[in-house]
Image: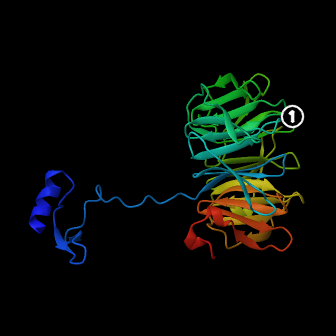
């Protein structure tokens, strides 16, 4: 009877015998159980391993509504920063998010590996998607003082009218090619961190009006305007302070010499939070003195910082999301954004 059953299964294509596999008969229910000889593993194509989820948090955007938008390689999520409760998960054409921005109407713009999308925060629906960008890989987003959206890609810079959802202009021949990071100075000019230093762009004309190519290490991966009106520039080996008017490098912040600086933001006391691939620290803006080191994050590789949101400092890392209480200093992971084996650190 057993041999007849084997012949039947093979004849209809439901029985596959792999090299090194033998079939054993389970007496109680007569089912076939595959077993493998110890020296020949199963075919990985027929028996694929489960793909591990990527928990990196790439972008954090505080909204006018008080919510916090979280961009990750698992998609877009809106949370209540006071309670941590997830208010919405938004379905996007591409879930690998690189950048977020909020326009003057409160709409959320999302940059992904396959373009840019506009999300209505009231309905959580995508209301516009994809434009004729220089390339589809979006790295940075910023809304200027007039309300226009600037989109940085790995092959240039574009400007979009958020209301009409229309592409207004494209700067393809950007010095340094890749628009890794964006910020505005106090005169409303756009500063672009590229593969070859900093580029200053007029938001009125979209023309390049200045450059700082002599950045140590060349690559700029983070640029932020300080409350004092200076540019704080993160590179793979330094944290620099630059005067946007004279275009001079004022100083290299001593504690970060030789460190890979990935993100910088400022707290309400005007001091700086600096994220690196080796952890997160708070420093005095004028002297660079380290005021605080944050331990027990999901990972020491910091990707995004959002201070002063829900009386917390929110931190995106390569292994998940965490928050730091600004009153007690307590560090806790957000359990919806970390691996199970990292939830109890």
Q: Which of the 4 quarters of the picture holds residue 110?
A: top right
Instruction: Report the side of 22 relative to 296 (left or right).
Output: left
The reply to whether residue 193 is in sight is: no
Q: Secondary structure at mark 1?
A: loop
* Left or right of 333, for residue 231: right
- Disc 1 crowd, CA 10 A, few/some/many (<14, 14-19, 20+): few
Q: Where does the image place residue 299, in percent across and percent down from the top left?
A: 61, 66
Which residue lies at the image location 61% right of the left edge and 65% below the top edge?
A: 338
| Left or right: 59 in relation to 265 | left
Q: Picture coordinates of residue 15 (x, y %)?
A: 19, 58
In the rendered image, the residue lying farthest to the front is 1
Q: Quadrant of the C terminus?
A: bottom right
Q: Nearer the viewer, residue 173 or 213?
A: 173
> Between 206 and 113, which is closer to the camera in this rendering?
113
State the scheme by which the image is colored. Answer: rainbow
Q: Quadrant of residue 37?
A: bottom left
* Residue in the image at 85% along x and 60% along y: 271
Quadrant into which the N terminus falls: bottom left
Give the answer, above or below, for where 241 lies relative to 107: below
**Total residue callouts:** 1
| In the foreground, 294 or 234 | 294
Residue 147 seen: yes
Q: Eyeballing the image, is 171 above or below 38?
A: above
Q: Position of residue 90 (x, y in %)?
A: 65, 46
Q: Which residue is mark 1?
A: 187
Residue 162 % position (x, y): 75, 29
């Amino acid at each position: 009877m057993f041999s007849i059953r084997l012949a039947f299964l093979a004849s209809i294509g439901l029985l596959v015998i792999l090299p090194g596999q033998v079939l054993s008969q389970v007496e109680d229910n007569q089912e076939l159980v595959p077993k493998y000889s110890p020296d020949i593993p199963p075919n990985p194509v027929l028996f694929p391993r489960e793909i591990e989820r990527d928990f990196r948090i790439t972008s954090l955007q505080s909204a006018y509504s008080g919510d916090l938008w979280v961009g990750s390689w698992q998609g877009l999520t809106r949370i209540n920063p006071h309670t941590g409760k997830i208010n919405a998960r938004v379905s996007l054409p591409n879930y690998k998010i690189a950048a977020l921005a909020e326009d003057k109407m409160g709409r959320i713009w999302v940059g992904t590996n396959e373009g840019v999308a506009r999300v209505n925060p009231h309905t959580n629906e995508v209301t516009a998607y994809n434009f004729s960008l220089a390339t589809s890989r979006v790295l940075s987003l910023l809304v200027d003082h007039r309300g226009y959206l600037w989109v940085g890609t790995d092959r240039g810079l574009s400007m979009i009218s958020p209301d009409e959802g229309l592409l207004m202009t494209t700067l393809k021949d950007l010095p340094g090619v890749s628009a890794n990071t964006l910020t505005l100075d106090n005169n409303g000019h756009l500063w672009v961190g590229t593969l070859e230093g900093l580029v200053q762009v007029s938001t009125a004309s979209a023309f390049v009006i200045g450059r700082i190519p002599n950045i140590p290490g060349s690559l700029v991966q983070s640029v932020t305007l300080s409350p004092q009106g200076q540019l704080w520039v993160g590179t793979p080996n330094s944290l620099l302070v630059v005067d946007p008017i004279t275009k001079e490098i004022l100083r290299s912040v001593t504690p970060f010499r030789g460190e890979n600086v990935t993100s910088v933001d400022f707290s309400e006391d005007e001091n700086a939070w600096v994220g690196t691939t080796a952890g997160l620290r708070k420093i005095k803006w004028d002297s660079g003195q380290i005021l605080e080191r944050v331990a027990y994050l999901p990972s020491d590789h910091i990707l995004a910082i959002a201070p002063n949101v829900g009386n917390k400092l929110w931190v995106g890392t390569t292994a998940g999301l965490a928050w730091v209480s600004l009153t007690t200093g307590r560090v806790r992971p957000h359990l919806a954004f970390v691996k199970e084996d990292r939830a109890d650190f």
